[in-house]
Structures are given as structure tokens and as C-alpha cells.
Image (cartoon, grey):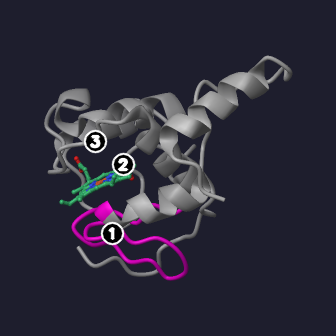
Amino acid sequence: MKPDGAIACAVAILACQFALACPAIAQDVAEGQRLFGRCAACHAVGDRARHRTGPQLNGVVGRVVGSAEGFRYSKAFVRLKDEGQVWTEAMLDEYLARPAEAIRGTRMTFAGLSKAQDRANVIAYLKSLQPTQIVRGAE
Ligand code: HEC
């Protein structure tokens, strides 16, 4: 079953009246996987994922920013890595909404996902991916 965003939200809000743990927005992994089609031109995931225009994203939630081995990141990302910044869901939400504004100088030329529900679903999908180590990265 794949309820659309609005219905998923309404269901989440209703469920929240009875549950203690209540995410702000329900997350739908399958829908996130579908939406990832917009990212796949630049980002590989899964077994033997190689870097493309963007780094592979296996295990990116909880990963240090700019730390996929063998990928050449922007200076902005290198700075965040040096600070030891880790991708939290909140940071991803902000970055994916408007990459160029969230991290000035990023090389990710993607306009962003304007809908909070879409971002929540994509982040849910990213969370479902296990970390893997890259053997060789195409630049
Ligand atoms: C046009 C190519 C392109 C598209 C489309 C794109 N990205 Fe990116 N992405 C990049 C590049 C390039 C970087 C590296 C950014 C830098 O070095 O500043 C990046 C970085 C990232 C990072 C940080 C990775 C790390 O190792 O720190 C995440 C997370 C990410 N992208 C997610 C997404 C998601 C999710 C989508 C789809 C909604 C997407 N990107 C669409 C090119 C793209």
C-alpha cells in the first residue's frame, strides 16, 4: 500500500494520538526509492556502487560529511569534514531542500526537493542502505 503524502500525513497524525513515539512526518521507503530516480543520474547506491558525478550514498545517514573514499568533494564539503560534521536526518532535510543555500559552494547542482514529504521518504530510503566501502571510485 502506498498512500500519497497527504494521506500518509493524516494517518501519522491520527496514529500519534495513540502512540508515544511520533515522527513529525511518516517515512515511506518504497516511495523514497522511487524518488531516488531523480538522484540516480549522479549517485549510485547498493552493491559495488561507484562514484558518478556525485559520491556513492550507501550508509550516508550517520556518515561524516564528505567522507566517501576516492571522491573529490567541493571545498565547502572538505571544510565540513574537517569539522567532523555527520549527516543527521535534520541536516539532510535542510540540504536536500535547497542544496546550494544549505551548503554554500556545494558542487551538487540539484535544485532540491521542495516537498517535506518527499525529503522524508528519500531520507527513509537512504537510511535503509547499508554502508559499503568503495574499492575504486571513478572520479
Ligand atoms: C547533478 C548531479 C546530482 C544530483 C541530481 C544529485 N546530487 Fe547529490 N551530490 C552531487 C555532488 C557533485 C555531490 C558532492 C557535493 C560537493 O562536493 O559539494 C553530492 C553530494 C550529496 C550528498 C552528500 C554526500 C557525502 O558524502 O557527504 C548527499 C547526501 C546527496 N548528494 C544526496 C542527493 C540526493 C538524495 C539526491 C536526489 C534527491 C541528489 N543528491 C541529487 C551531485 C548530485
Residue found 40% across the figure and 66% down from its top:
56
Q: Is residue 6 magenta?
A: no
Depth order, front residue of 8/33: 8
Where residue 66 is drawn, which disc sits there? 2
Looking at the image, tell me whether mark 1 or mark 3 is earlier in sequence order.
1
On residue 77, the disc is 3
**Label 1 CB sits under 8 Å from any ligand 1 atom:** yes
Q: Residues within 10 Å of mark 2 (few under 14, many from 20)?
A: many
Q: Residue at x 73, y 24 (%)?
A: 14
In the image, is 25 to the left or to the right of 52?
A: right
* Any part of residue 88 in sight: no
Q: Residues within 10 Å of mark 3 (few under 14, many from 20)?
A: many
Asked whether mark 3 and ligand 1 are closer than 8 Å, the reply comes as yes
Foreground: disc 1 or disc 3: 1
Answer with mark 2 or mark 3, whichever residue precedes in sequence. 2
Task: Give the residue at mark 1.
Answer: 40
- The magenta span reads 38-58
